[in-house]
Image (cartoon, rainbow, N blue to C red):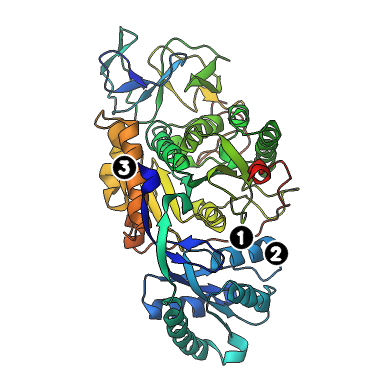
Amino acid sequence: MSDRVSFQGYARQDGRKGIRNVIVVAYLVECAHHVTRRIVTLANDTDVQLIGFPGCYPNQYAYEMMCAVSTHPNVGGALLISLGCESMNRDKLLEDIRASGRPAELLVIQEAGGTKSTITAGVAAIARIKAEADKAPRVPMDLSELIVGTICGGSDGTSGISANPAVGRCFDALVQANATCIFEETGELIGCETIMADRAVTPELGAEIEACVAKAESYYRIMGFGSFAPGNADGGLTTMEEKSMGAYSKSGSSPISGLIKPGDIPPTGGLYLLDVVPDGEPRFGFPNISDNAEIIELIACGSHVILFTTGRGSVVGSAISPVIKVCANPETYRRLSEDMDVNAGRILEGEATLDEVGEEILQNVIDVASGKRSVSEELGHQEFILTYKSFEPIGPSCLPVRLVG
Amino acid sequence: MTNTKKNAQVILLHPNDNILVCVAHIYAGDEIFIDGQAVGMLKDIEVGHKLARRPLVVSDKIYRYGAPIGSMTQAARIGEHVHMHNMQSDYIPSHTRTRQNKDRSEAQ
């Protein structure tokens, strides 16, 4: 059924295809944030979106993330706003985005004459970039060309029973159609490492998966807090491993084809685990300070759409890729239905089965890929967070599919 | 996922589990059936929360989805709420808004 599904995508020079044609307007340090935000506000266009990195100190991860999201297939062009003295390599970033075939411009506030002058120049630049981006050719795009990421936020004791396994059913159907699915947050998979390793396509990948969960456990132990929020406890979750087992069910039952890190693009269809916990001794703080930091990493790995499950009730969306919200808890759904795309709480009330809700989620993915706005998109949610991190490249055992592919 | 006999308020996720999960608000005074046995509820239990399927003692491992999710720090009667006051992680401590230290359990 679903392997024949196709829709209209935007063709990009690197061969990838997008489901949106967003212009990103990026501040390259917090000092340029206000000017950048004003430009976005004045552009008054859902598809002109604010992103950025607040830090002045250099960070390879931040550079790679900025580059990955600015050249994401859902992005058609970019405007970079620099104060002038920060460390982000603005010329290289501009060059990398242009080399990807996208229109891109750079404004340096210290050279452009200050706040008002840069805002005026920025608004004019957006019009030029948008005119150019609008020329992106529309081409048929198959379900197998889609990358779908998943995250849970505001989990409660119902998440692991309804919304998460329903997303797992949707993931199974997508993998069956040779699409790419990414699940993440190794800190929220503590306790699942052994069963997860058994699903890896090779024993070596299984060992890498176990090692990356051990890394997450050690990292969180040093930080003094697990990836467990007070709201998780309010909603009936008691321990990290209980939350993990629930989170894990988002992955469905397909074999795990690879282990990737932020910015790595999965080489083929299949199910991938994204390791979001930095390598080495903890240096810059918590691995992900809130859900949007993980969403941006899923997007940097090429995710066109994000499936966000919630029990307590999150309202967030994201810049660049649409977020589809699947509500696990029927009581939460009744309170926050204006923010939800799918009511998986029906499963708990005996009104729908996991398979039916899984099918409904898949239909939402297809609709959103075909251009329909998700609820959070419609509401104007375009959250974006990027903080300091450091990663080593993935090891040779992490992507066994590359060898056979 | 199967409903325990006659109960729309709790579900058993796996035959080996020793807890049930509340799926519709339970009020103090409600009577629920656990494996065919009528149990009077002494306190409210909210959706998503766990209750003991059988009497539990200190150090008992708690099974949900058929997998261990932590251990008891206090005993619990059948039908009693199982949460941070009587169980804890075997891996990494959980925190709440009021308890943000590295204690292993709320029950100190």
Image quadrant occupied by the N terminus of chain A: top left
Query: Mark number for residue B47?
Result: none
Residue A24: % across, % down: 49, 72
Q: CA distance from mark 3 to mark 2?
A: 41 Å
The chain carrying label 2 is A
For residue A358, side relative to residue A212 (left or right): left
Residue placed under numbered mark 2 in the picture: A59
Type of the residue with mark 1: Thr
Residue placed under numbered mark 1 in the picture: A387
Query: Front-most of A130 and A201?
Result: A201
Any part of residue A233 in sight: yes
Q: Are marks 3 and 1 on the same chain?
A: yes
Residue A105: % across, % down: 55, 82
Q: CA distance from mark 2 to mark 1?
A: 9 Å
Q: Quadrant of residue A203?
A: top right
The residue sitting at the right extreme is A281
Nearest to N terminus: mark 3 or mark 1: 3
Label 1 sits on a secondary structure element that is: loop
- For residue A90, above or below residue A259: below
Label 2 crowd (10 A; few <14 / some 14-19 / many >=20) = some
Kindly identify the residue that appears in the image at 46 percent across and 16 percent down.
B17
Type of the residue with mark 3: Glu
- For residue A193, above or below residue B2: below
